[in-house]
Structure formats: C-alpha cells, structure tokens
Amino acid sequence: MEFRRIFDTIPEQFDQYRPRYSAEMFSELIGYAQITSNKSVLEIGPGTGQATDPILHTGCDYHAIELGENLAAMMVKKYGGYPNFSLVNDDFITCDFGSQKFDTIYSATTIQWIPENIAFAKTFDLLNPGGVLAMMLTVADYRTPNETLYNKIQQVYSEYFKPDTEYKHGSFRYTNATNYGYVEFEKREFYGKREFTADEYVAFSGTHCDHLVIPEPYKSKFFNGLRAAVLEAGNRIVFQDTFVLMTARKLK
C-alpha cells in the first residue's frame, strides 16, 4: 500500500491523535488571503479535519478533496451539515476539476505526497488571479523538554524500528513554488505545546505512516519500548511544536 493511502486504515486513531494547528496561524492565513464568505477555498487532503474548522467557519465556499475513502466519510460526518461544505473523494493528482477555480488553496502536510510538478503547476492553474497557495507543516521537538527521555526513545528506534517499506518522502521543496509562476513566497512560524501520557504517545506514534508498516515481532517490541520509556519518565512526554506556514501568490 502507498504511504499516502495508509492513513485511511486508521481514521478514528488519526482523528484523535494527529496534531491540530495554532489559532494564530489560521488568523494570519485568513487575514493574508482575505478569506471571507465570498471567497472560494480548496483544501487538499484534509484527513479528518485537522486544519478545516477555522477556514470553514469563515463562511467561505469551502471545498475539499480527500484520497482516503474512510477519511472522507469521517469528514462528511463531521461537516456535511454545513451549507458551505463540499468534498470530493478523489486523488488530486488525477482529478479533473473542470472549470472550477479557487481564491485560496491550502494543504496541511498533504502536498508533500504530490509530485512537485503536479502540486505546483496544478494548484497554480486552479487559482484565480491573485489567489494564494498556503502550505502548513508541524516540526515537533521532544528533545529539548527532556533529553534523557529523547535518548531512551532513540535507543528503542535503533533496536526495533524496522519498517517493511522505507519512508523516502522528504525531498519536496516548498520553496520551489516560485519555479512554477508563484511570487511572494513567505514563511512564518508559530508555536505550541502538546503533552502525552505513555499510552497516548504510543497511539500518536501509531499514526505515522512508516510506523504502521513495522512487521512483527519488531512492532510489538517497538511500541512497548516507547511506552516503557515514557512511563519511566513519569508517564509524560512533552512536544514543543513549531507550526510552519508557507504562502505564495499567483499574480493578478
């Protein structure tokens, strides 16, 4: 199974444990892109709505495209009652949007799964003149709050993290948007904090695509090792999060 499809196998766990983003980030995006009730917005790969609520609640004409059937179903269950909500269960790479155009297109970590030439060229074509492409990601740091715990977790990874399929995504270059006609590329950072118990941390770790493909007996030993490390640290692990917002604009 492709990594970008594997999240669809754990919709409830994904919904509960994947990180949300900072309110300040959304305020910045909504103001910068001037997202209001008379604007049309497309979210690429919303998952189960980790970055949906603040944009949907502007009253904009909200559209989403979600690859996962189960994730899409959860999105419809959560937001289908909103009159400004619309979702297509399809692959952005191959989807024909017809004559649709949008004032803002945004993605929370999803765009990295799309080949660069398609991600930037297709979003550029789908945007109205002056439209904004926004891309979000989270950089999580649990080393700074507790380096001893960090080192113990790294030992667990060294011993038992042996996924069937190697995760090779990481070459996506957000700054390359300017090679496809975009201008005014900007990067902004916002900050937050999460705390997990041992069981919560294991559940969260189980939402990472490459963690889902660890075979037995390594899988059980890996997650048991993570749990034991956090329990030993007082049943608490802290993440200092950096929320990164990158925007680029299509010229008017």
Image: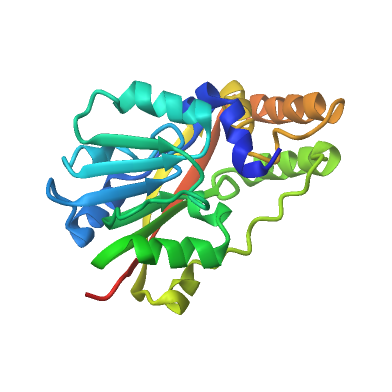
Question: Compared with residue 46, is residue 168 higher up or lower down, i.e. above or below?
Answer: below
Q: State which quadrant residue 229 falls in.
A: top right
Q: Residue at x 49, y 66 (%)?
A: 174
Residue drawn where x is 61% and y is 27% of the image: 9
Asked if residue 244 can be seen in this view, the reply is no
Q: Is residue 61 left or right of residue 171?
A: left
Indicate the position of residue 124 as horizontal and vertical percent values.
Answer: 37, 66
The x and y percentages for residue 113 are 57, 52
Q: Which of 137 and 125 is in front in this view?
A: 125
Q: In this view, does 76 lie above or below 112?
A: above
Location of residue 75 (image quadrant): top left
Farthest-out residue, front: 98
* x and y, in percent, of residue 162 in the image: 83, 40
Residue 24 visible in the picture: yes
Q: Quadrant of the N terminus?
A: top right
Quarter the C terminus occupies: bottom left
- Is 20 or 119 nearer to us in this picture? 119
Q: Which residue is drawn at 63% across and 27% down?
A: 202
Left or right of 39, for residue 148: right
Q: Nearer the viewer, residue 174 or 149?
A: 174
